Amino acid sequence: MSTEHPQKQEIDWEEKWQQGNTLWDHGESSPALTALFKNEETKKLIPESGLGLVPGCGSGYDVVFLATKDRHVTGLDFSQTCVKKLHEAHPNAAEKNYDFRCADFFNFEIPVEKYSLAYDYTFLCALEPYLRPAWARRYSEIIAKDGILITLMFPIDDHEGGPPFAVNEQLYRDLLSDHFELLYIKDAVGHASRLGKEKIAIWKKL
Ligand code: SAH
């Protein structure tokens, strides 16, 4: 199933990838994400099997981290240059139970069983703010009942403009609460340069 794209995005991500203008890239998954899988309280909230999705996956670290023998993970990015690099860097992805697709989050074909896990980091903040309601609607369509959405909220501040566009906890609550129950939220200890500007949350699809 796919929905109409709400409106064309203005930011030229393909150009950024072509020019190597990827300053957001920290070279590894955020320690705030990996910590969720080390902590018994949060680990037990996250389904161990099914299908996972990382929209706007960039260099794909989180896709590799989240894929297990029981969980297939798809990294999605609509920059062709980005996905070409991913395919070159990960020739054996299928064996490790992940893949990368060049597609638009708002308009790509989703599997019948839907996703049991999605991870959103530096994706909401990458979108022009008018797309936020569509972002929330899309997650509500593509995540299975009882499936989990992990949001690493960034950047929590009040600067003007973007990307990254400023976010805050209330924004996520307003966007997601109709379709998701908030199970867990905490100040995040992630990449050092982002300390104090991030919270990590686990949402369950109703
Ligand atoms: N999450 C990655 C990349 C963040 S930059 C990281 O933390 O390193 C945001 C990424 O989202 C870019 O690679 C951009 O190409 C992609 N993107 C933006 N809008 C998208 C859309 N509608 N569908 C798929 N990918 C999108």
Image: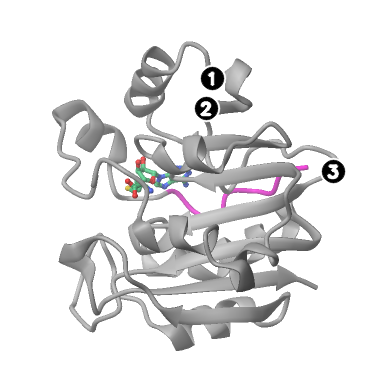
For this view, does 157 lie left or right of residue 45? left
- State the residue lying farthest toward the bottom: 170
Query: Which secondary structure lies at badge 2?
Result: strand
* Residue 13 in which image quadrant: top left
Magenta-drawn stretch contains 81: no
Task: Tell me the residue at 64%/38% (across/down).
Answer: 108
List the residue tagged with mark 3.
113
Q: Earlier in the sequence, mark 3 or mark 1?
A: 1
Q: Is residue 187 above or below residue 11?
A: below
Q: Which element carries disc 3, helix, strand or loop?
A: loop
Tell me the amino acid under the disc marked 3.
Glu
Give 150 or 135, whichever is nearer the viewer. 150
Residue 181: which quarter of the image? bottom right
Which residue is at 72% across, 49% downward? 48
Position of 5 relative to 153 (above/below): above
Residue 104 seen: yes
Q: Of the residues shown, which amino acid type is indicated by label 1?
A: Ala
Q: Magenta segment, which residues?
A: 1-8
Q: Is residue 16 left or right of residue 111?
A: left
Disc number placed over residue 93 in the picture, else none: 1
Q: Report crowding for label 1: few under 14, some 14 to 19, many 20 or more residues within 10 A (C-alpha).
A: some
**Helix, strand or loop for disc 1:** loop
